[in-house]
Image: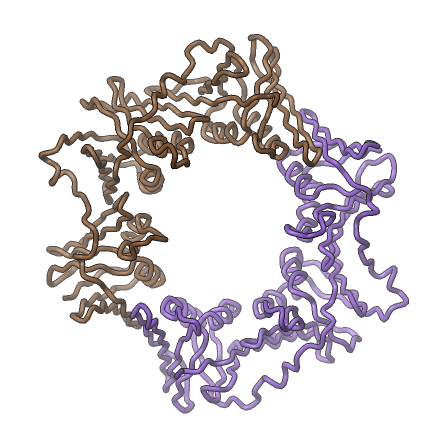
Chain colours: A purple, B brown
C-alpha cells in the first residue's frame, strides 16, 4: 500500500511523539513508532510502557495498514529533508520505501502485532470509574513549572517520584516534595466534581511541560491511568499506585517571624554562596536581624568563605538558620517572577515557609524548605 | 598589600586566560592563576605546561606582589558579581580577601615561587634564532578555521597532532592531515623573510580560534616555542619537535576528471547518507556519470539504505568511488562558504582533490580525501 505526506508536516508530528521513545531499553520494539493508517488518517504512537504519546494527521492513502518503523532513523531522515512530498510504499517483504524527487530511502518495518497495546480513553474505559475535567493549557503549564522541580529522584519512595493532583472543593491542588522541600500550588479556577487524587509520574510531567500550549487540555482518569488530551496530541500515563505522604502534617501553621526580601537580590547572593558551600551539606547560613539578612558559607577544605548583607524587612527575634544552598537556589529560581518574597520562620530546626509577597488572584502558592543543622 | 579593580574588567581578563587552565591535571598548581602586580599593572598568567596565556590591565595598587590564586573559584566569584569595584587585600596568612559593597569573600593563595616558569618573548630569547613576523588577525583565523579539523587525534603520530606553519617564498602555508584527509591552505599576502617550518599543537590552535580577532597578530618563533601576541593577550606554546610528514608526495598531480557540484546540495544529501552509513567504514558511494552524481549508502545490519541523485558537471569516464561519509561531511562543512566546488578524480583507489570552483585572491585552498574500497 502507499501514502503521501508533506515532509514538514510529518516532521512536526514526529517531533511531538518522539519524547515517548526510550533511548535505552531492554525491549527493542519500543524504539519504534507504531503507524496506524486508517481512512485517510495517519496516527502515530510511541510508548515506553509508562507513558504513551499519540497524534494524527490527514494523509492521502489508498488503503489501511498498521506497521512498526524505527523511530530515530525515520525521524532523522524526515527532518533532514527540505520541504517536499514523501511517498511511502509498504512492500510485502518487510521494506518501507520512501521516495522524494531526488532520493530513495529504504527502512525495515515490523508487524504491528509486536507493538505493546496502548490504553485508550475514554472509549474502552466507559465501564470504569472514569473521571474527567478540563483545564486551560497555560494554567496546567504554570502549575507544572512551579512544582516539578521538587519531585523526588529517589526510587526508595516511589510516591514522591511524581506530582500529586489533588481535586478538592476549592479547585485543583498540585503538590510535589522530596522530603527536603515541598511545593503546594492551588489553582482555584478549575471547577470539577471530582473527589479524588492521582500521582502523575515524573516522565509524564516533563513531557507535558514541553507539549502543553495555551489551548484547553482534557483530563480523563481511570484507577490506573490518566490521559491528557491536548489539541493535537494525547499523552496517556500510568498513575503511581501508592499513597501520597501526608504532606499537610509537615506544613507548620504558626511560623510567626516574617522576613520580606527582594527575590532577585537574594537569588544573586545565593548563587555566589553556592561557590563556597561545596561540602556535602552545601550549607548556607542565614543570620537574620532587624532589617538585615547576612548570608554566609564556607568551604573548610580549600579555606575559602563568602559573606553578604542584604536589606530585608524583619521584626522577629534574631535567628541563625542553615539551609542547603542548592535547595534555596531551586526555590528562588521558581519564584523569580515574584518581586518580593516572604520567609515565615519559627526556629532553626523547624520547616520554613516561603511565599510570594503579593498573592495572585485564584492562586495559592507555598514552598517549604527544611533547615539543616548549623553545628555538626 | 591592596589593589582595586572593576569586576567586569577583571571578568573580561579572566575569561581570556582561563582556557589555559587544565581541568584535570596531576599538578594541582596548574589549576591556579599567577597574579603579578607590578607598578600599577596586573598581569595574569595560566599554563598547562604546553600552552600559556598572559594578559594585563591597569589597576590601582599600593605595592608590588606575586601570588597564585585558585582559577575556577576566583573566576566563578568574579563573574557572578554585578558591575562593582572589587577591593583585593593580600594578608600575610595566605588569605586573599575580596570585598565589595555588600560582600566579603576569602580565598587561599599560594606563593608564586611554586608556579612553573613561563617562557617570555622576545626578551629572553634574543640570543636565540628568533624569527618574527606579523599577520592580520582575520587571515590567521580563516587559515585555522579552514585547516584545524583535519589534524590527527592519534598519539601514535605526534607530528600530525598539530598544524604545520610553513614559511615559503609565496607566503605562509598551513597544512593539516590525519592520513585520511588533508588541508593545504596558502596565504600569499604575508610577506616575511623566514625560511622555516613549525608545527603548532592542537590545543594552541583551538584556543587561538577563540581569541584571535581582526587586529594584527605578532608571531615570534624560537626553536622550541612560538608566541602569538594579540592586541590584548599573548599565547605561548611549545612547538611539536618532530618532522612533519612529506605531505606533497600524497597530493596527486594529474587527476584529470573534474566534477563540479553545488556545495550546499551535496552537503545536504551527504548528511542524509550519514544516517545510513553507520557501519565501521561509514561508507558512502559516489557513482558519477555524465552530469549526474548518484550517492548511496546502506546499513546491512538494520536493512536500511538511501540513494540520491544530484546534478553535476562531469565529462570524464564513469566512475564509482567510495568515501568515509563523515570525512566528506567535514570537508563540505569547511567549504560551506563556496557556492560550487570541484572534485578532481582519477580512479577509485587514488586520492581525490576538492577545491573551490572560484579561487579567492591571494589564497590557495586545497583539500584532499582518500577513498575507501567499495567491495570488501
Where in the figure is residue B329, as x and y percent of width and height? 52, 30
Where in the figure is residue B271, as x and y percent of width and height? 58, 32
Which residue is more in the foreground, B347 or A322? B347
Q: Is residue B327 left or right of residue B218?
A: right
Indicate whether A290 appears above or below A150.
Answer: below
Where in the figure is residue B222, as x and y percent of width and height? 18, 33
Q: Residue at x 34, y 73 (%)?
A: A298
Pick out the residue farthest to the right: A127
Can you say which quadrant of the picture contains the N terminus of chain B? Answer: bottom left
Q: Is residue B61 left or right of residue B322?
A: left
Q: Residue at x 31, y 24 (%)?
A: B173
Q: Is residue A289 left or right of residue B306?
A: left
- Total count of labels: 0
Pick out the residue farthest to the left: B127
Q: Is residue B364 left or right of residue B271?
A: left
Which residue is more in the foreground, A21 or A79? A21
Where in the figure is residue B22, as x and y percent of width and height? 33, 51
Amino acid at each position: 500500500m502507499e501514502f503521501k505526506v508533506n515532509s514538514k508536516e510529518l516532521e512536526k508530528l514526529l517531533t511531538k511523539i518522539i519524547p515517548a521513545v526510550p533511548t535505552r531499553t531492554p525491549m527493542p520494539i519500543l524504539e519504534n513508532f507504531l503507524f496506524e493508517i486508517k481512512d485517510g488518517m495517519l496516527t502515530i504512537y510511541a510508548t515506553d510502557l509508562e507513558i504513551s504519546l499519540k497524534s494524527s494527521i490527514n494523509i492521502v492513502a489508498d488503503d489501511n495498514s498498521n506497521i512498526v518503523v524505527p523511530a530515530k532513523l525515520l525521524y532523522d531522515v524526515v527532518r533532514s529533508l527540505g520541504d517536499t512530498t514523501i511517498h511511502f510504499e509498504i512492500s510485502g517483504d518487510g521494506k518501507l520505501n520512501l521516495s522524494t524527487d531526488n532520493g530513495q530511502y529504504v527502512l525495515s518495518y515490523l508487524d504491528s502485532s509486536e507493538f505493546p497495546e496502548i490504553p485508550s480513553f475514554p472509549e474502552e474505559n466507559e465501564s470504569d470509574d472514569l473521571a474527567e475535567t478540563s483545564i486551560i493549557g497555560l494554567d496546567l503549564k504554570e502549575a507544572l513549572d512551579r512544582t516539578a522541580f521538587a519531585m523526588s529522584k529517589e526510587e526508595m519512595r516511589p510516591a514522591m517520584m511524581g506530582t500529586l493532583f489533588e481535586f478538592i472543593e476549592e479547585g485543583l491542588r498540585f503538590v510535589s516534595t522530596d522530603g527536603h522541600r515541598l511545593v503546594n500550588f492551588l489553582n482555584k479556577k478549575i471547577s470539577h466534581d471530582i473527589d479524588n487524587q492521582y500521582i502523575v509520574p515524573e516522565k509524564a510531567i516533563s513531557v507535558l511541560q514541553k507539549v502543553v500550549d495555551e489551548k484547553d487540555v482534557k483530563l480523563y482518569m481511570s484507577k490506573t491511568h490518566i490521559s491528557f488530551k491536548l489539541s493535537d496530541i494525547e499523552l496517556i500515563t500510568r498513575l503511581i499506585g501508592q499513597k501520597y505522604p501526608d504532606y499537610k502534617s509537615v506544613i507548620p501553621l504558626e511560623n510567626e517571624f516574617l522576613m520580606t526580601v527582594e527575590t532577585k537580590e537574594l537569588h544573586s547572593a545565593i548563587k555566589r554562596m553556592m561557590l563556597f558551600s561545596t561540602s556535602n551539606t552545601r550549607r548556607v547560613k542565614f543570620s537574620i536581624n532587624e532589617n538585615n539578612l547576612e548570608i554566609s558559607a564556607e568551604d573548610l577544605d580549600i579555606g575559602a568563605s563568602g559573606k553578604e548583607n542584604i536589606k530585608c524587612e524583619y521584626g522577629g527575634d534574631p535567628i541563625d538558620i542553615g539551609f542547603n544552598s542548592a535547595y534555596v537556589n531551586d526555590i528562588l529560581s521558581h519564584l523569580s517572577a515574584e518581586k518580593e518574597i516572604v520567609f515565615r520562620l519559627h526556629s532553626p530546626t523547624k520547616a520554613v515557609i516561603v511565599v510570594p509577597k503579593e498573592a495572585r488572584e485564584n492562586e495559592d502558592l507555598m514552598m517549604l524548605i527544611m533547615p539543616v543543622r548549623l553545628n555538626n
